[in-house]
Amino acid sequence: MKQFVISFFIFFSFYGVLIAQDIQEKDRTMPKYVFEANKVFYSGNYFLALSKCESAYKRLGTKGTIREKGAMAFNIAESNRYLSRYEEANKWYGVCIELKYFERVPEVYFYKGNMLKMIGDFPSALKVYEFYKKIAPKSMFKEVEDAIASLQKYKDFSSDESRILVKCETKINSNKYDMAPSFADKKSKVIYFATSRDESFGSARDLIIGHKFMDIFMATYDEKGNPSDVKSIDTKGIINTSQSEGSVCFDSKRKTMYFTRCPNPSKVSLGCDIWKVDVNGEEFENPTKLVLKTADSISVGHPCITEDGNMLIFASDMMMNSKGEKSYGGKDLWYVLYDKKNKVWESEPHNMGSEINTFSDELFPSISPTGDLYFASNGHIGIGGLDIFVAQRDGVENKWNNIKNMGYPINSIGNDYGICIIDSKTGFFTSERKTSSSNEYTADIWSYSVPPNLFDLKVVVYEAGNKTKKIEGAKVEVVVSDGTKWEGITSDKGKEKGKTEKWIEKKDKSRYILVEKSYTLKASKQGYYEDKRGAKFSTIGLDQSQSFLIEMTLLPIAEIRPPEVRYPLDQWTFINDASCMSNDSLQYLFQLLDENQNITIDLYSHTDARDTEIHNQALSENRSKAVYNFLVDKGIDPRRIKPIGKGESDPAKFILENGEEVILKEDYINQFKVSDKLKFEQLHQLNRRTTVKITSTDFDQNTALPADPSWRNYITPLPR
């Protein structure tokens, strides 16, 4: 393990060390150019090694053994992989397989599968992984199973609808590495980030990646989200030096800054360290290295501090602490606690535990404003290489649960890491995905945002109990919980009859319906009772956009004729057969009363004129009581209903085909008794009707007078 760079740890792989040792034993017989290429590769200088190894591979030609050519092809593939050149790496792992180098290193198949996944060729990656399962050592079985699972995970994530929008921050990114953003101010307008751009300190190049050594730069964002003033945070050599610096965090008061510093490749025995510096305005003072490790070769970095200020979390390759607490494998997240008495961080790191750490790598921890822990991992099942995960803290100790993959589109098939959270809807992160302007898997800073929920409103007003009768010209008033209000009129145009216009945007482009508000609606129109109950809806707690359609009713100040109710001749029981389902019609009255708990009604029943007036009066009263009993038995308060029999005294009105209105008196109907018996019976049936008149809209169950108990009882026998 040699070097901890800002984007991720680069170490010799286990198999690489074995191969290196094997080569060193044979270095007396191998060609000098092969030995030199291997030497550069195993020093970790992958940018330089790539050209050296490619040249050596060509020179081997037909002279070199298959094993020598396979080893050199493997070096080329690995160099490309470390430099995020995944298409080239995939090609050279294929060369290794052609040269049967998998007999020496079976993991060639696994690495090739990884590259295929990184370039988005999932079907081919699955085939390679499945083949590797047949030859993989037991120690790799779980890793390949997780890799296969990640293919499905990506399909699941990418198929899910996500409202998250991601954007490459091209105005601050360079054509080199830009990564690990963090906020330097409490308003989250100034970000610090690590970069290997050409403007970085000094002239030396990092031979691992071929760029300048990383420095910490800054960018300031305005209220519209536009960045400016992109520059180095330090030109005095206090923070930015000839070494690599990055991965910044601050204490809660922004008075102390912590950052990672990694030695350049010439100092191969030294690992990275976490430093702190006092912040005095735009000046940095008193840089101090934290004592967090037991050996210089160990790397520690990527610091973050919990919101309570008591825990410093960081990434490290340490295998165990001084008390024997072991790593779970790869790079783990560790932490130290703050000694409030002595005002220093403890020097004994503790592992974050198996809930967070895996056999692979966990890196780039950060803390959100709500105290959640974000980190990157390629050990938890994810989409690509490194994925960003979030965990919730349980209490004030090192207890974390509900670990969740951030999903697509924040995570991609490339490496994604180094997130910093503004709030629940916005933030920045690092991604190595391709962009429309770049075909390279280069680390860039991206932003993400969740668009605000958008709501709109339409109201339809119809006559109480009759949804088919839309009311045009009704006024609808909307009152918001913040005291604002507006009104509209229901339309009479085409399909929009009875509906208000769709309330979306005001003239100033602001929305009518806002998030986290409640709304009360009232409808009114002349000729209808006042709408005292109204309607309500709310956007409080809603996490998705929505179109609201609110239906409201108005009660006409007039008699209401419900759908038809029929009775057998000279009876008051209801007809319920194919000719007339009276109970369905009576349900209309029940719904009218049930939906309008404040109204009282007079209930009228009428008969035709084909009997004596005394008989018909009693018959109409019984029929009215039958409806009354139906409603009371359904649960309507009997004090809200008064049954009245009208006998034959109030014949119905009828509109002829020519538009003339006639009253269906007995002498009018009798003219059809012989000439049109069907019409004769139909006109008599129109007189046998039930009507309703609303008598009040302010029923109060606490003050209402008792109902007449006789209304339950029928008159029998009917008088003649």
Image (cartoon, rainbow, N blue to C red):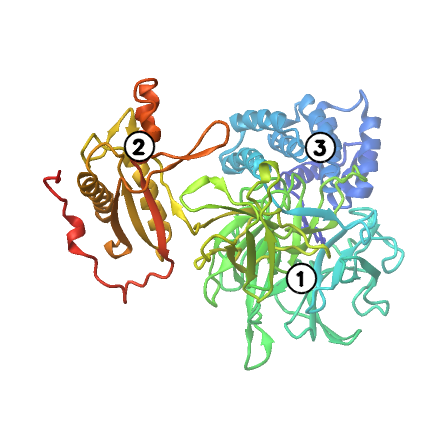
Q: Could you tell me which quadrant the C terminus lies in? A: top left
Q: Position of residue 114 (x, y in %)?
A: 63, 34
Q: Position of residue 524 (x, y in %)?
A: 51, 55
Res 703 → quadrant: bottom left
Answer few, some or many: residues within 10 Å of disc 2's Cα (few below 14, many 20 plus, some between 14 and 19).
some
Q: Tell me, yes or no, if residue 549 can be seen here.
A: yes
Answer few, some or many: residues within 10 Å of disc 3's Cα (few below 14, many 20 plus, some between 14 and 19).
many
Q: Which mark is residue 11?
A: none
Per the model, the C-alpha gap separating discs 1 and 3 is: 30 Å
In this view, the residue in front, 9 or 176, is 176
Determine the secondary structure under disc 2.
helix
Q: Is residue 429 above or below residue 437?
A: below
Provide the residue designation for mark 2.
666
In this view, the residue in front, 567 or 583, is 567
Per the model, the C-alpha gap separating discs 3 and 2 is: 108 Å
- Seen at 58% across and 56% down, the residue is 374
> Relative to residue 22, is residue 551 drawn left or right?
left
Q: Tell me, yes or no, if residue 270 can be seen here.
A: no
Q: Amino acid at mark 2?
A: Glu
Determine the secondary structure under disc 3.
helix
Provide the residue designation for mark 1.
296
Q: Amino acid at mark 1?
A: Asp
Q: Earlier in the sequence, mark 3 or mark 2?
A: 3
Provide the residue designation for mark 3.
74
Determine the secondary structure under disc 1.
loop
Q: Nearer the viewer, mark 3 or mark 2?
A: 2
